[in-house]
Amino acid sequence: MEPRAVVTPRGEDRIAGGHLWVYRSDVADVQASGGEVVAVVGARRRLIGRALYSDRSQIALRLLVHGDRPVDAAFWRARLEAAIRFREGLGIDATAYRLVHGEGDLLPSLIVDRYGEHLVVQSLSQGIERALPEITAALVEHLAPAGILARNDVKVRALEGLGQEVALLHGAVPPAIPVREGPIEYEVDPWTGQKTGLFLDQRENRAAGASYARGRLFDGFSYNGGFAMRLAASCDQVVAADISADAVARIEANVRRNGLTNVRAIEANVFDELRRLERERERFDTIVLDPPAFAKNKASIERALAGYREINLRALRILSPGGCLITCSCSYHVDEAAFAQVIYEAAIDAGVHVGVVEKRMQGRDHPVLLGVPETYYLKCLIVRRIE
Ligand code: SAH
């Protein structure tokens, strides 16, 4: 008999509402082992669809198809090809971008990023882990990459009972891959870099930010200098700050690679550095704030909001009148409205008038799936201090 999971009416409602996840508490009965594709069965034994089953995570089911459609090699090939075709039509001016964004591409818990001729995948559930050979075969057949690396050293895998590992799945992947993003070149280390090597989700925000950049720029939480370098051409002087010595080394290497002479990288805690800059009465015409997710879960929302308020308040205080602040939050738990409220409160506390110039989000290669709010995580506001 086909492995199957019977869901409660609430589970059925979630799927009807467009979500792909069914929590363990909404699974009434299951006959399957972890990682298998199961038939999802509702009231009166109706077949709702097929899903990946996890025997460990709170997310027990991740829906793959509605109705009685097979999940076979042809299924994986078709879903992957649709995701890749969408990116090919976006006219992305870069050699590094996301090819598969999990739920946003109806391939829940699978990430595939392209770095030139190489691919980096992340398998974030038992089901994707089991399907990885088929997925790898489909990617090789369709894209003929020089190599595929699995960056499966991601904490969320522990929730699935999966180990932490970095493994070569196909061909060869070097420790340094040259990639281009607009006019900027990076050397990316897919084996050890953060995420899969680059913060690809910010690519379009870096490009957008460039049109407002001028004068003195402060790039806070810079990682490998992405915003700093993209904006440097329109600025006189750039300071890129990151708390990690490794990140600062990456910024310096990338700055040299691009022949930029006006970018200085500093190892600093942005909270302290902003306070110091304010004390010293320094002024900047452009400021970027792209911190890591301050809210990792619901319990930390209040502290996270306080953190966002603090850095944005300090930034607005040292921003010259007429200057722009490009401010981001990648915490899913702090939604767009809450983040906008934080910026408004920071402006009131700083005693400045601020106008919203652009409301942005993660790049188009990281699509949001309506019905799955978790797929909308990155917010980017570009605001101008008017006075
Ligand atoms: N802006 C980057 C991505 C930033 S990721 C880009 O466009 O690619 C967040 C970075 O913040 C990480 O590199 C991390 O090392 C750094 N970081 C975390 N806490 C910090 C702190 N308190 N002060 C400075 N940097 C911090």
Image: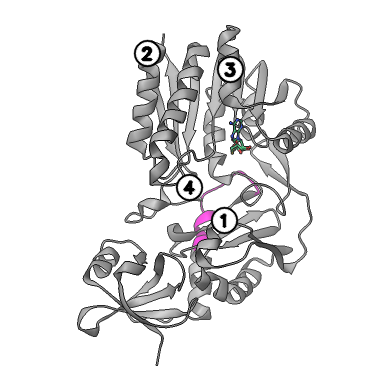
Query: Which of the marked residues, 1 or 3, is nearer the chain's N terminus?
Result: 1
Residue 223 image position (x, y, % from top left)? 65, 36
Q: Secondary structure at mark 4?
A: loop
The circle drawn on residue 214 is 3
Q: Earlier in the sequence, mark 2 or mark 4?
A: 2
State how far apart marks 2 and 4 are (Cα).
31 Å
Q: Which residue is mark 1?
A: 155
Q: Which mark is residue 131?
A: none
Q: Which residue is mark 2?
A: 353
Residue 139 appearing in the image? yes
Mark closer to the observer (1, 2): 1
Residue type highlighted by circle 2: His
Are dots 2 and 4 in contact, CB under 8 Å? no
**Cβ of mark 4 under 8 A from ligand 1:** no
Residue at the image point whose x is 76% and y is 60% from the top:
173
Query: Contact, CB < 8 Å: mark 1 with mark 3?
Result: no
Q: Is residue 302 above or below residue 17?
A: above
Q: Quadrant of the C terminus?
A: top left
Q: CA distance from mark 1 to mark 2?
A: 41 Å
Question: What's under tag 4, amino acid-wise?
Answer: Arg
Q: Residue furthest left?
A: 44
Asked which colour scheme the image uses, the reply is one colour
Which circle's residue, 2 or 3, is located before the other in the chain? Answer: 3
Q: Which image quadrant: the N terminus?
A: bottom left
Observer-side mark, 2 or 4, equals 2
Residue identified by numbered label 4:
364
The answer for how far apart the CA atoms under marks 2 and 3 are is 20 Å
What separation in Å lies between label 1 and label 3 (alpha carbons)? 39 Å
